[in-house]
Image (cartoon, coloured by chain):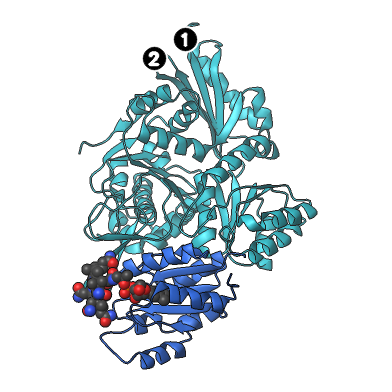
Amino acid sequence: MKQKRVVMGVIGVDAHVVGNKLMENALRQSGFKVTNIGNFVIQQDFIKAAIETNAEAILVGTLCGHGELDCQGFREACIEAGRGDIHMVVGGNLVVGKQDFRGVEERFMDMGFNRVYPPGVSPSRVIEDLKTDLGVSQE
Amino acid sequence: MSKDVEYGLFADFGSTFTKVVLLDLDTLTVVGRTQRPSTVETDITLALRAAMEDIRQILGGQVEYRYNLATSSAAGGLKMAAIGLVPELTAEAAKRAALGAGAKITGVYAYQLTRKELEEIEGGGLDLVLLAGGTDGGEQETIISNAEKLARLGGLRAPIIVAGNRTASDQVSAVLASGGKEHVITDNVMPEIEILEVDKVRDIIRDLFIKRIIEAKGLKNAEEFIDEILMPTPTAVIAAAKLLAEGADGEEGLGELAILDIGGATTDIHSVAKGDPTEPGLVKKGLPEPYVKRTVEGDLGMRYNASTIVKVAGEAFFRESIDSLGLDLHRAVSRFARNPESLPESEADEGLDLALARAATRVAMDRHAGRIETTYGPNGPVYIQYGKDLRGLKTVIGAGGPLIFGPAPDVILRETLFSDANPFSLRPRNPTFYLDGKYILYAVGLLSEKEPVKALKLGKKYLKRLNSS
Ligand code: B12
């Protein structure tokens, strides 16, 4: 299989990196070519990295509750940059406090994300979905 | 003159002057120096021979030279274009690689080359083209299509160095070959995001300079009188900077440092420094900085861009510094620009020259040094560092005409300093200033290839200390 390439990072002014590292390791072990641009990352940096690496997916982590604001216009920016087709995933603590996840999911889907995960999601679930979405044959 | 002494003759073919310095390699002293107006247009050896004759006069006879080496920035320097994919990523990496190899960058290009850009490249009189784009295994369409476009440029004779996505290199090579383009394939300048690999490219540029460019520029006949033109002048300064910082074989260096070099056409800054944050709580972001970093400000030349300097630094600064001189600022500045070889003729000219040098230095250091940007998070402000933190630097060296020949090098050098008025610009706080008063940094760089310890001792001996701090 040709390695699938993903760009990941934690968006915005967000100091939480543990989940990001965890997810990176899990993705690498599952055979993905991972470009992890770390935290304090803005949309444009995700997109630039995705262009250079020709990534198939962008994985956005957002932990401290600013996700909705930080992610606004992300899909549109990808479209502008010529990568409107890229698969986009978001996870972490997307919003502040305990809100009904269905509503949260819907709002992020409306923003153009293809997969939206609730807090504490297991990396294996994210990876299974990613393999399906990117057409990685399971063996 | 003594027959037992070992001498080294070091020449620099500059765009305006051909300089020669003769060193006594036993006592490590400068025996003689001279310069003659360069004769690139006619026969480069005319100026060289005249300068060598000057040296013979100084010595009172003919001697053997242990080394007889030269650098060159004549005939436009080593002109290169840097091509990449994303401006802040592979295009920037390509630019840094070329600058670090002593090149003079004529243009930096990103994404698909446009027709206008191709015309620029074709008509730019380039010596080399550096073609990058895509991380290894990453995007490859752009570099292949740019290679196709370059391959079709009939007027492009310069060798092309390909340092992009490794996966694309076979195809890029085939495409360039089909267009009859001389090219070299090497490692990617940016194999992965945030990883910069410039060493291979730098070595190849150096190699092509010696093998191809010297001849192409009509400098080859100098080798009748000189053993070898080893490198572009800026490369020798970079080598000297590195040697002076790091030391050699038990001879201690000066530690991390910066060199400010003000010239008629550009203002350059070299730093040999890691640039890691010097205070806790700073988060480092952006493309990693090369440990030996060279920036070249093509809009801050003391002569060619005198009026740009005024524009960039602001008229207010100039009014303040030269008001008392009774000069018509704009007229004086355009007079300088029209006569790039002119030296200050009056006290007023000198005052203007000093103001120009100060302004150029301030802006050039602002661009070279890193900066802090503040963003606000849920916990208040977060400080992010881009570029190098040079606040802890202990040594700043001045080079170039306005510093060497001007009346107040220390005043100019002070413009490199950290300022409370602009605390987010990470400039040196409290360095010791030195001056390359004898214009020998290039010779130190050349000699460092042969005898690093002697080169280092010589450099340290002739750097003139300007302040104590
Ligand atoms: C450790 C911690 C910190 C540390 C972080 C250290 C570091 N370098 O990472 C420090 C002390 C710096 C910190 C600071 C703050 N924190 Co804090 N922090 C935590 C804590 C206790 C644990 C986080 C952690 O590492 N978990 C372990 C990892 C493995 O889990 P995870 O991050 O959730 O990741 C998992 C999933 O979410 C998912 N995932 C993560 N990333 C991604 C990305 C994608 C694409 C996908 C699909 C999935 C995914 O996969 C992981 C595995 O299951 C949590 C509470 C908690 N128990 O979760 C609060 C918590 C995250 N912090 C919180 C807050 C509010 C803050 C502060 C604003 C607090 C403050 N006022 O001081 C600051 C933020 C500063 C800033 N600018 O970012 C809140 C967030 C509230 C919200 N969103 O509703 C939490 C939830 C605490 C709470 N209950 O209030 N914090």
Q: Colour of chain B?
A: cyan
- CB at disc 1 and ligand 1 closer than 8 Å: no
Q: Residue at x 43, y 48 (%)?
A: B290
Q: Is residue B122 visible?
A: yes
Looking at the colours in the rendered structure, which chain would you say is drawn in blue? A
When asked about the image quadrant of residue B330, the answer is: bottom left
Label 1 residue SS: loop
Residue B454, above or below B115: above
Please state the chain letter of the residue tagged with numbered disc 2 in the rendered image. Answer: B
Q: Can residue B381 be seen in this view?
A: no
Residue for badge 1? B5
- Local packing at callout 2 (Cα closer than 10 Å; few below 14, some 14-19, many 20+) is few
- Local packing at callout 1 (Cα closer than 10 Å; few below 14, some 14-19, many 20+) is some
Amino acid type assigned to the residue bearing label 2 in the image: Thr
- CB at disc 2 and ligand 1 closer than 8 Å: no
When asked about the image quadrant of residue B83, the answer is: bottom right
Foreground residue, B389 or A21? A21
Residue B27, labelled with which disc?
Answer: 2
Please state the chain letter of the residue tagged with numbered disc 1 in the rendered image. Answer: B
Is residue A103 toward the left or the right of residue A82 in the image?
left
Residue A86, above or below B8: below
Q: Residue B138 location in percent, x, y? A: 58, 63
* The C terminus of chain B - image quarter: top left
Q: Which residue is drawn at 24% across and 48% down?
A: B429
Q: Residue B204 location in percent, x, y? A: 60, 41
Label 2 residue SS: loop
Is residue B336 toward the left or the right of residue B85 in the image?
left
Ligand 1 is found in the corner quadrant, namely bottom left
